[in-house]
Image (cartoon, rainbow, N blue to C red):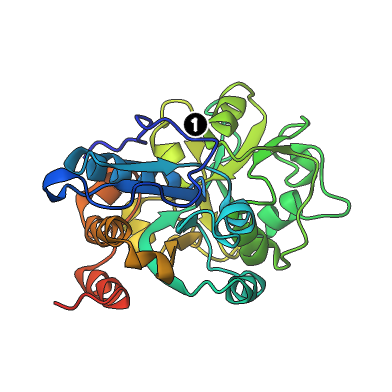
Amino acid sequence: MAMRVSLTLVVMLALVIGCNGCGDKDEGEMSGEIGIAGSSTVYPISAAVAEEFMRQHPGVKVSVSSTGTGGGFKNFFIPGKTPINDASRPIKDSELEQCRENGIEVIELQVGIDALSMVCNPKADWVDSMTFAQLKQIWGPGEAPQRWNEVDASWPDAKFELYGPAPTSGTFDYFTEVVIGDEDAHRSDYTKSEHDNMLVQGIEGDKHALGYFGFAYYVNNQDKLKALAIAKTADDEPVKPSLDNAQSGAYPLSRPLFIYVNKNELEKPHVKAFVEFYIRQSATDLISNEGYVPITEEQMKENLAKIGITE
């Protein structure tokens, strides 16, 4: 099945604050505005869901912005500027506490599974896989290696060109915690961006480049990139990122994806209708078309129950 990253929505840099005209239009047509910020990994899912919802409900305007998970929480969701935040990692305790202080009751909804991908230039024929230890050596802090052969003597004597998400990103947080083992321990001398397509372009243009981001951005650029198989230890068989391997858990960098909803906002009919629609779409091919693993029917029902809908 062809996979695509939906780019048909115009990303709104100025997110919708509040809701103007939330009432019904003539003849009961649903209307209102919804702002979504957060994860660049979850962005393609939210953009696709929003596009389909607006097609069915033209009176509702949904604006989706890629700000990074942490940036979305800090600048939009916690201050109450947006009712929904995309997240490629679970909400932090500190963020949850700030939500409580602002009177925001949070609902966590898993909307898919990602296979976080470590990618290089296709011309990098010396490397097909890496272990967690090698990834930690490359991306960790301190005396981090600057050249490929500092990690493996059989690799070329050439300088790394590293690309990855910014520290406001949930992908950054997840990778740093799971691979490096300390949420504050990640090298800083690399090209950072919250726009994953910019990372793709950088890696595509340099034979000695290496970087990481969500699986969807690799799938959408398979002709330009090479994904590395990953092994937790040197004794493990390296596993390539794929939807099947993410779903089974065989791929060691598979992770859940979320949206977080301000429960108070569900009192607005257009917001609740959109969240219900999002939950139902999360168990369909819409998710796999975007390069992620859909949730199960059971998970869908659990999510619906969280917003007061039982089946």
The residue at the point 70 percent across, 40 percent down is: 154
Above or below, 261 against 274 in this view is below
Q: Measured from the top left, where is residue 140 in percent x and y?
A: 77, 55
Residue 171 visible here = no
Q: Residue furthest front?
A: 26
**Which class describes the residues within 10 Å of circle 1: few (<14), some (14-19), or many (20+)?**
many
For the residue pair 103 and 292, the one nearer the viewer reads as 103
For the residue pair 98 and 156, the one nearer the viewer reads as 98
The residue at the point 46 percent across, 62 percent down is: 255
| Image quadrant where one finds the N terminus | top left
Q: Residue furthest right?
A: 143
User: Total number of numbered labels?
Assistant: 1
Residue 47: name its quadrant: top left
* Secondary structure state at the residue bearing disc 1: loop
Residue 273 visible here = yes
Instruction: Tell me: 144 left or right of 171.
Output: right
Above or below, 225 against 89 in this view is above
The residue at the point 80 percent across, 41 percent down is: 189
| Image quadrant where one finds the C terminus | bottom left
The residue at the point 29 percent across, 39 percent down is: 51
Q: Measured from the top left, where is residue 123 in percent x and y?
A: 56, 25
Instruction: Tell me: 53 left or right of 96.
Output: left
Q: Which residue is mark 1?
A: 225
Q: Measured from the top left, where is residue 293 in percent x and y?
A: 32, 56
Q: Residue furthest top?
A: 205
Q: Amino acid at mark 1?
A: Leu
